[in-house]
Image (cartoon, rainbow, N blue to C red):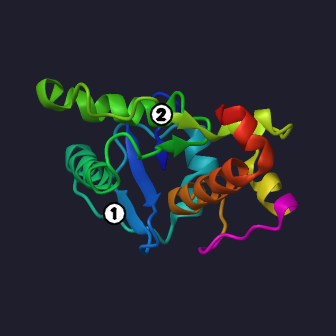
Amino acid sequence: MDAETNGLYGAPFAIAAVARGGGAAPAVFLGRCPLIGPVDPWVDREVIPMMTDIPCTHDGLDALLDDFWVFYRAEVEAAGDEDLVCIAHCAAPVEAGLFRRCVERDPATREFQAPFPLHDLATLLLAAGEDPRAARPYLQKAGLKLPVEDRPHDPLADAWCCLIAAENLLSEPRAAAVRA
């Protein structure tokens, strides 16, 4: 999964997630809402230009968070609570913050429903001797391609990048030693 926020600790304005398993077609979530508050200069320069073709699908943050939560929980139910591996690349503070915001919308119900643990692709890359901050060079080195146009900070491309890199890293022989 991947989220784009208005600064590292700001409100999310775009969320993407890709789930696959059991041979079924991938389930995909992609949502976007207007940014809240003044736009962070780095986000304005580096992120917004990569998202010009992603329309706003939600009127506001609450609706985006609620729809993402419904998608996430449906995938948990489909996979089984203990079997779903939720992974993001450099998950703190952005994706961890996203799940915190989701839980805070209904803490009595959601407190124990967010991913625990939220896995991080960066740790897998580090364990494999790769740069933990750079998933795309790993994909290129491994000869792996994305099924969507590859644009950094496009949340759907980033979610696919995370999924494909994680699947490959976890399938490699050394992954058995890491999982032991």
Q: Is residue 86 above or below residue 18?
A: above
Task: Determine the secondary structure under disc 1.
Answer: loop
Dots 2, 1 in contact, CB < 8 A: no
Q: Nearer the viewer, mark 2 or mark 1?
A: 2
Residue range corresponding to the magenta coloring: 141-149
> Compared with residue 143, is residue 61 higher up or lower down, i.e. above or below?
above
Q: Is residue 142 magenta?
A: yes
Is residue 139 among what the camera can see?
Answer: yes
**Main SS of residues in magenta:** loop
Residue indicated by mark 1: 56
Q: Amino acid at mark 1?
A: Cys
Does 78 sit left or right of 155 as displayed?
Answer: left
**Spatial separation of the CA atoms under disc 2 and disc 1:** 27 Å
Which is more toward the observer, 19 or 48? Answer: 19
Q: Residues within 10 Å of mark 2 (few under 14, many from 20)?
A: some
- Amino acid type at image mark 2: Leu
- Label 1 CA crowd tier, 10 Å (few <14, some 14–19, many 20+): some
Q: Position of residue 177 (x, y in %)?
A: 74, 35
Numbered badge on residue 118: 2
